[in-house]
Image (cartoon, helix red, strand yellow):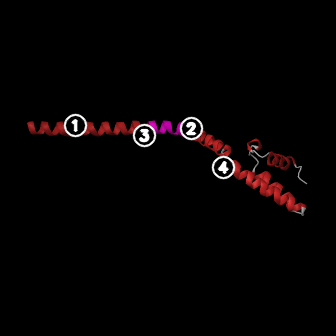
Amino acid sequence: MKILKGIGITIGGTLVLFLCVGGIMSIATGVNYISKPFETIMRKNDAEVDRQVFEEGKSHVESVARDLAKAKREIAEEKDEVAKKAIVNYINDTYANFDASNLEDSSLRQFLKDCRNGNIK
């Protein structure tokens, strides 16, 4: 009888252990299920902040300045009006959301504003 009692206690203890582990796992899954939408929202905000920092970064602004200087030179050398219009459209499409005030060179800043306003002839 003692042996059966010992086996019953061992089996009962094992069942309690499995139930506890299962309960902890279900709680962890539930918490993950509940917190996942909040994490997704927070990551989107982090991505927006990272994007804004990148766009205001010196290397990005310098890259835009280089591209604008090249486009400005191409427009000055180009004789064909259709080609000039294509370059202006490319600039407007590529840098539509770029903040012109980030440019240090005032002539490039004015060139970008002129492209946006359609003042390039």
Q: Quadrant of the C terminus?
A: bottom right
**Which is the main secondary structure of the residues drawn in magenta?**
helix
Separation of marks 3 and 1 at Cα, in angstroms: 24 Å
Of labels 1 and 2, the one closer to you: 2
Q: Residues within 10 Å of mark 3 (few under 14, many from 20)?
A: few
* N-term-proximal mark, 3 vs 1: 1
Q: Are marks 3 and 2 in contact (CB under 8 Å)?
A: no
Q: Residues within 10 Å of mark 1 (few under 14, many from 20)?
A: few
Q: Is residue 96 left or right of residue 75?
A: left
- What kind of residue is marked 2? Met
Q: Residue at horizontal 82%, vertical 60%?
A: 74
**Number of the label disc, if any, that sits on residue 13:** 1
Q: Is residue 18 left or right of residue 55?
A: left
Q: Quadrant of the N terminus?
A: top left
Pointer 4: what residue?
A: 59
What secondary structure is found at the residue carrying circle 3?
helix
Q: Residue at horizontal 59%, vertical 41%?
A: 44
Q: Measuring from the top left, give residue 63's x and y in whole percent.
A: 70, 52
Q: Measuring from the top left, give residue 5's x and y in whole percent.
A: 13, 36
- What kind of residue is marked 1? Gly
* N-term-proximal mark, 1 vs 2: 1
**Number of the label disc, if any, that sits on residue 62:** none
What secondary structure is found at the residue carrying circle 2?
helix
Q: Residue at horizontal 68%, vertical 43%?
A: 56
